[in-house]
Structure formats: structure tokens, C-alpha cells
Amino acid sequence: MNVITRQASGSSGEIVTSSKSSKTSNTFGKRIPRTTAKKRGLIIRTISDEATEPSNQLTEDDNVDQENEDEEEMDEDDVGPVVDNFDSWEGPVWENDNEAEDYFAKLYKNGELYNDEEFGKIVIKPWQLFTNKQHLRDVVRDYCIQSGFSVVVLKASNLRWTVKCSASNNEWRLHASRLLDGVTWTIKSIQNMEHTCSGLEVKNPMVSTKWAARVLLEDIRANNDIPAKSLNQLLWQRYGVQMSTSTLYRMRLKALRDINGGREILYAQLPDYCEMVRSTNPGSSAFCAWTPQDHIDRPLQFLSIFISFKGCIDGLLAGCRSFIGVDRAHLKGNYGGVLLSAVALDANNELFPFAWAIVSVEDTDNRKFFMWHLKNLLKDSEKGDEWCIILDRQKAGRRYCCKHLVKNGKKPFPGPLMFSLFWRACGAYSEFTFKKAMEQLHKVNPAALIWLSKAGDQSAWTKHKFNEAIKCDVNKSNFVESFNATLGMERARPVLTLLEGIRRTTMVWMCTRKQASANWIDDDICPSIKARLKVITQESKCCKAYPNADGYEVTDGKSVLLVSFAEKRHGMRAILHARLDPKQFVHEWYSMRRYKGVYAGGINSIPDSDQWLDFDMPKIEPPVMKRGVGRPCRERRRDEDEERKGKRSKTIKCSNCQCYGHNSATCKGGPTAKQVAAASASTKGKGKQADVASAAAKDKGTAALASAKAKGKEPMSYSQPAPKMRKLSGIRFSTQP
């Protein structure tokens, strides 16, 4: 076939053509096949001998369909240089495309674009097209690992890539090269398609943490806490390989770094994150603090960040009582820090977080920072100064956490009696009950009354002195700790991932509860309040009510109380005796209307950091890294009175001797003769039951001895001969017989 070449011409500008046995044409130093030029719709211009200007040129747009057959038979001597002004996304190539073929199928008719399949057997063959060289290398690596062999690279450049099997007795070889578009790669040839060498069942050098992080990235993204055992199962099912547990955990850490970004980079994005919060949720409060740029030791270092969304503040003011719990949670990341949370209770007594902050350390300045922002959020509300804050620190809020108060009194006043009397005094709903508890405390230890008097005003820790306008009798900050527990392993994530996790959790809560309460009746009370009324009704069955001139007289045991309808189980008994509906005496703060008002608004989504605007904020540095001794603790430290987690059985029973206190692995053959004799002596003189028990013990001991001998174990005995002793140069040592 004739090939057009552009050669230097004389003064007349003559174009000279030459014939060669090739399919390519030289166009401005770039060789393009004629068939490819026609498929790509390139414009072919012809230049006459009389003029060098393209005024008398013949221009034709040849598309893939080749509508005009006469133009294909055009004399090649009349064809001039090929001008590549083709746009792959415009022109008749796409307008006349009715078959919806892929771009690569249009461009390379002989090739087949490789389809990435998530699961299944990987198949490679000649003339498969890949988007780039890295795509080709990844697919070949996956194929080799799945097939159980490794390869070595023979040739590698920007134009070609050749690998062969690492086994010396196998001739498997793959050759790939780059196509003319400069990006796409294809497999040109594969020698010995059927791989015949022995596989690498023990260890494949192509398996690495980087490869495992790539193939398991989506699984780790779906579950950040997926264990190593599950990761090994996925690798075995898909590729037939396994990795060590420690290597898998390092790989998971690398994958999480790719998903969430580096911890240092995320600290630098916190100022921009505050701007995004204010722009996507107008009216929200988002403040980030850092050291000044001219600081001597720590310029532009992170100090604290405070976040509160507009939808949360509106819900708090619309339907929540003026009762707020504040608590802290230590973060488990590389840089440590403390999470401060402010949580309220809605009309259904459900958690409603509305503000949170992250500070570098928990000290007086950072606590003042958080409380100052809370005051600015609530100062413009109608409730004014009626807000009640409960803290885990004594004398720090308007209401004390009695759990921490009793815990502090446990050391100077130990014992279960003092513990129960403390709680009876803290939970007293009437002055009479409180007085009785304090009198009993005085009888047991008079110093306990002095200690409680120093704890502060009674309105901060005993229920009968609480402010009734708040309509909340909670005396513990456990509900804030419950919110911190919902974060789980998010506390070990990078700081920006943690903030987004809290926002997403709160956003989902608000949306879900809004949808669930859409069909509720406004004048009715909330479901948890109805359940609470049933519990109080059951508790009031031990009481009896007698009507009098001023109200009701209720007897509870030997106590006679004059009560009103507002008191708890005594008031419930009086309400039921009067044949009234208890719902009439529930305050309006617990109604469905208030509940719907809390979740009337919502939180808007925030896009990922790649879509943020450029706010021209400084890039701050993370705080000083804190590294403790040993492995960081992920679980919450439980108190002494709390049940330990993970212990399924508290009593161990041996399957050999049927005795308690040990298992079959540590069994010594059952009770010895001395133990049997002691058991029989303890039951001696107790009649027939003692004889039966003694006989059963002997039978059990005999059966245990037989079972131990059958398994080759020698029973424990206290009548073994003493070890022999002998003297040797003033040194004494013992030898077993």
C-alpha cells in the first residue's frame, strides 16, 4: 500500500510522494495508520501544485460508517498531510452512534477492554486493553497470585513491559506495550497460556501489605473494625492466600490511612471545616482555636474546636427541658485529646446531643472555653438563667452526679451499708424519707453527715430539694456517658473523621425520629413516659389510699403519708383510687408536641474535603504526640461494682470428675482419699442423707480414679514417699524417685 510522506519541497512547494510496504503515514512527525485516521474522523486535505495555501483544498469528514465509498478509492497521490483536530466527545462520530459502543471498541477494533470484576476468576488474554500501565500491572499481579505463581520483570519502560514466570522450568511469558494514544496499554502476546509449574502454596513474594490494602479496600471501608480473621477468609476465598495476623492489622491501618487521610493532614483542615459548617448550615456555631503564628515554641498549633449546629440549637430551645449533661471522653488516637459533649433529654427521655468540642488537654482553661460557648448559645433563650447543668465533677455544676459523689465517699466510708444509705439519701423524694436515711447514717457513722454537709447545698444532690420547674429528677450523668459509648471505635479515628462521625450520628437520629413521630397525636404523651407510668402503677400496689378533707392519706408499710397527686407511687395510688387518668397529671414537657418540636429541623450534609471551597485559612499543626506506655486501652475502665465484660461462665465444672473449680485440662484425677474422708466426716451423724452423700462421694471418687487411669493420668495423693536426700561436698539437693 502507498504511504504518504511529507518531504522538503523546492521553491514551488511541490509535495513528493513515495511508495513503501507499510500502513502508516507520517504526519508532522507522528505516524498514524490510515485506518485509524479514518475511524477517528480526521480531516484529509489535498494541496495543489499551483498554490501552497489551502484555499483550493478538498476537505471531507470520514466517519466510522464510511458513507461515501468513492472517497475510499481516491488516488493516494492526491492525498496531502493529515490534520489531527479531532475531538473524541464531539462531531458526527458520536452523533451518528446508534449502537452505543464503548470508546475503546471504536478506537481499536481488534482489542477488548478489560472489565474489572469484583469477584471470580481472573482471565487475561492477548489484545486486552487497559486504561494505563498501573492498571495492567495490578491485573497481572492479581492473576499471578490467584493462579499461585510469581513473575520477574524482563523489560520495563514507558513503551513496553515484559514479565516471565519466576520458575526456571516454566516458559510462561507476557509482553505488553503502549498504544499510539500514549495512555492505553494492551497485552500483545502470552506464551504458554496453560501455566504448568508447581504453585507457591507456602509463600508468594507478590503478596504484600500494599497489594492486600488495594484488594480489600472496599471491605475495610464498609467496616473499619473488621478483624484479621475475616480479612484472611476474604483473601483465601478470592485469591487462595493467607497472611499473618500482625501483617493484616498493619495492612488495615494503611488502608484506613488511605480512606481517612493522614492524621496530620486532617488537623490542617479543621479551620476550613468550621467554615464549611457555617456555610452549609447557616446560623451554626463552629470555632477553632490555635496558637498565633509568632509563637516561639508552637506556632499555628491546634488548641480546641467547638461545633454546634443550628438545627440542634433550635430543637433544644423548642422541646427540651432546661437540663443539660456535660461529660468528657478521652480520645485514643496518636495525639490524644479529650472530647467534651453537651447532651439534653427530649420529651421521650432520649439522648439529644447539641454541642461538642475537642480540646488538646482537659484543664481549667479548656473547660472554661467549652462552658463559655455553651453560655453564648443559651443566653438568648426565653429560659434565661434557669438552665441546670449536671457534671461529673463535684461543686462544678448546679446539680451533682450522685454516682461520682457516692464513689468519692466510698473510700472514707466503705461497706455496703453505707453505700445503700448514701443512695437512699440521694434518691429521697420526700423530706420524711430523707430524714430517715440521714438518721440511719448518723447511727452507723456520724462523720458521714459531716462529709455530706461539706458536699454542698442539698438542692444539688438530693431529689426532694430539686427545682420543680426543671421537670427532671435525673441525678446521674450516665446519659452523657451513654452518648460517648455510641461513638465506639470512632474515638480512635482521626480528628476530622471523629467530628464527621458525630455529625452523621446526630443527623440520622434527628431524621429517623422525625419520621417515626410523624403520625403521633400531639396531645398524647410519649411512649417511654407511658411505660414509666406502668412501672409506677405496679410499684403503688403495696400502698393503700384513704381520702381525707385535704387530699389523700396513703399507707406504705407502717408509714402514713399525706400526699398530693404530684408525688410518685404514693400519688399514683391516690390517682387510681380517685378513678382518674394518670396522663392528666403528666406535664406538657413530656407531650408529643414537644417531641416533634425537637426534631422539626435537621442538619444538612457536608461534602467531602475534595469539594470544599478555598477559604484561605491557615494550615495548622497537630498537637504534641502523646505516647503512653504499652498498648492503648480501647475499652472503658469499669468500676469495681460493675460486671466484667466477656466472662461467660462464673462456675467451672470438670467433665472428668464432675467437680467444680477446675476443668478437664487441669484435672488431677478427682478428690483424694483424704478429701473423701473429710467430706464423710463433715456429714457424719446427719442420718440417712449423710450416708447417701458419703456413699455418692466415694462412688464419684472411684469413678474419677478409673477415668484418670484410663487417660494415663496419675491421681494426686498426699501420701507419696519423701524425696531422698544425699550430701555432696556440703551441697544438698533432692531427686524424685
Image: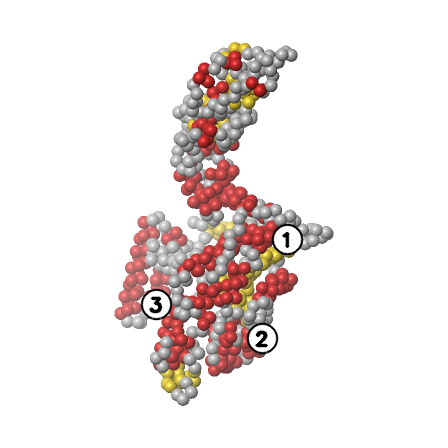
Q: Which residue is at the front of the view, 587 or 241?
A: 587
Q: Amino acid at mark 3?
A: Ala
Residue at 31% x, 53% y: name it: 706
Question: Few, some or many C-alpha atoms within 10 Å of disc 2 (few <14, some 14-19, many ≥20)?
Answer: some
Determine the residue positioned at 58% across, 58% down: 285
For disc 3, the marked residue is 681
Does the residue at mark 1 contact the one at mark 3 (Cβ under 8 Å)?
no
Q: Nearer the viewer, mark 3 or mark 2?
A: 2
Position of residue 73 relative to residue 696, above or below, is above
Tag 1 and tag 2, C-beta contact below 8 Å: no
Residue labelled with disc 2: 456
| Residue 192 image offset from top left, x and y in percent | 42, 22
Looking at the picture, which amino acid does disc 2 mark? Gly
Q: Secondary structure at mark 3?
A: helix
Q: Earlier in the sequence, mark 3 or mark 2?
A: 2
Which x, y percent locates residue 364? Answer: 64, 63
Foreground pick, 513 / 414 = 513
